[in-house]
Image (cartoon, rainbow, N blue to C red):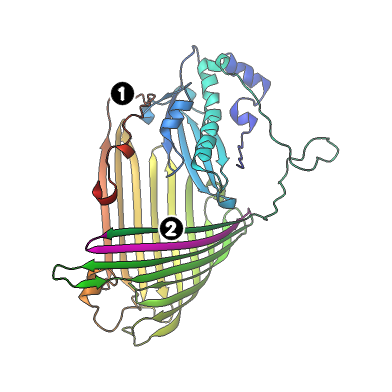
Amino acid sequence: MRVLLLLIAGGLLLSTPATVHAQLASDARTQQVRTPRVFLDCQIRFGCDFDHFRTEIRFVDWVRDRSDADVHVIVTGTGAGGGGMQYTLDFIGLREMGGLDDQLTYTSHGSDVQAETRDGITQTLRLGLIRYGVQAGQGRGFNVGWDGIAARSGSGPGTGEADMGEPLDPWNFWTFRMGLSGNLDLQETRTESRLNPSFGADRVTEAWKINTSLWANFRRDRRELADGREIRNDMNSWRANVLVVRSISDHLSVGVDVGGNNSVRNNQRRRVNFAPAVEYNYYPYAEATRRQLIAHYQVGLEHSSYYEETVFGVTEETVPLHRLQVQYRAREQWGNAGIGLESSQYVHQGGLYNVGINGDLSYRIARGLEFNVSAGAGWVNDNIHTPVDAIPDEDILLGRQSLPSSYAYEASMGFNYRFGSSLANVVNNRFPRSVRGMGGPGGF
């Protein structure tokens, strides 16, 4: 496991000898030994095992509401080189610890198993919280140790010390992945099977980002009707993509996106697109896990070969198009928010366009009360792939094809309210969901 713990000594405990003495002796804000209260705000889908954190980190009290906390920890993540993930942990001091802010990162390797990633995040979280434990007067309760790090090859010139620069990489930052998955569902009146092979190769550095992927889906579906008739719904799907991005500055990137796929639903036997693009982020990319305001513009060509003749009287065509996307996202102490605008247009006919807008908000209104809302709308006028002949009802019912629509809207809204004990220290793993008969083959 390749771990990057960017633990700057001044960001933890050891900025200057005077600072250490003041913290261990407890400054004016800390008059007695107490337990700092921590509110965990995890913004990543995988890696935040709250039960594990509570079990392994016992010198803090975990609380359910930010208004009860001395420390607000925001965890975000983004893709890193080698197929790994870089997790950013922002520590924000509240109340008496206001102004004691910090940031640590942990980077997992693409070959790490879930337990290794979980333990790495736990260790980073533990190290980040030590500062607040010391500030709360717990300094005498910590024992600091050092296991050491294996020295990299080479030595610093004239220093006699191990060179801590970039390690030698025989793969030159390239990572590869191959996968094969499938499923089989056999019943007396229905048979369904799927096979999904995949391949990918990536190279990520500060200057370059290269992603390639290939995926296929082979589906076989047989259904028997009440009158004894048999309906088959066999489909083969595939998609491939190559993305090459060059970093120009902290705010600007350029690249090219090449992709291809087929889609029975969209009457496309083969679709290939080539689109150079430029992207500008108002905020530095280093802050992208917390906030971003991105404008992304691409212009290129799209070639399509159709299963059936389209409403424009063609079975194959190459057309120019351009696309603009603007997106703002923020992850702050009060919650999360995001809004995005996307528009595309076929250049050869200005009336063929697609415009969409979407947004979401999760806002902490008051103690225990949270408001969530999301909405999206799209106006579609670029269905150049629609077949000229009527779509059979059987294909619509089976999901093979769908009737064209000129618009799409969706929205959701809700409130969450929680009250009672603010502490969340206790972990009880009895009767887990996985053993309580919550699903299984045939609904067992």
* Residue 339 rendering spot, x and y as whole percentages: 38, 54
Classified by dominant secondary structure, the portion drawn in magenta counts as: strand
* Nearer to me, 301 or 308: 308
Three-letter amino acid code at disc 2?
Answer: Ser
- Residue hosting label 1: 421
Q: Which residue shows up at 46% across the image and 18% down it?
A: 35
Q: Which residue shows up at 62% across the image and 21% down it?
A: 144
Above or below, 37 against 280 in this view is above
Foreground: disc 2 or disc 1: 2
Mark 2 vs mark 1, CA separation in Å? 45 Å
Mark 2 secondary-structure assignment: strand
Which range of residues does the magenta coloring cover?
187-206
Residue with the most extreme bottom position: 313
Above or below, 438 against 392 in this view is above
Mark 1 secondary-structure assignment: loop
Three-letter amino acid code at disc 1?
Answer: Ser
* Residue 88 rendering spot, x and y as whole percentages: 52, 40
Q: Residues within 10 Å of mark 1 (few under 14, many from 20)?
A: few
Give the image quarter of residue 50. Answer: top left
Left or right for 324, reference 355 = right
Left or right for 302, reference 243 = left
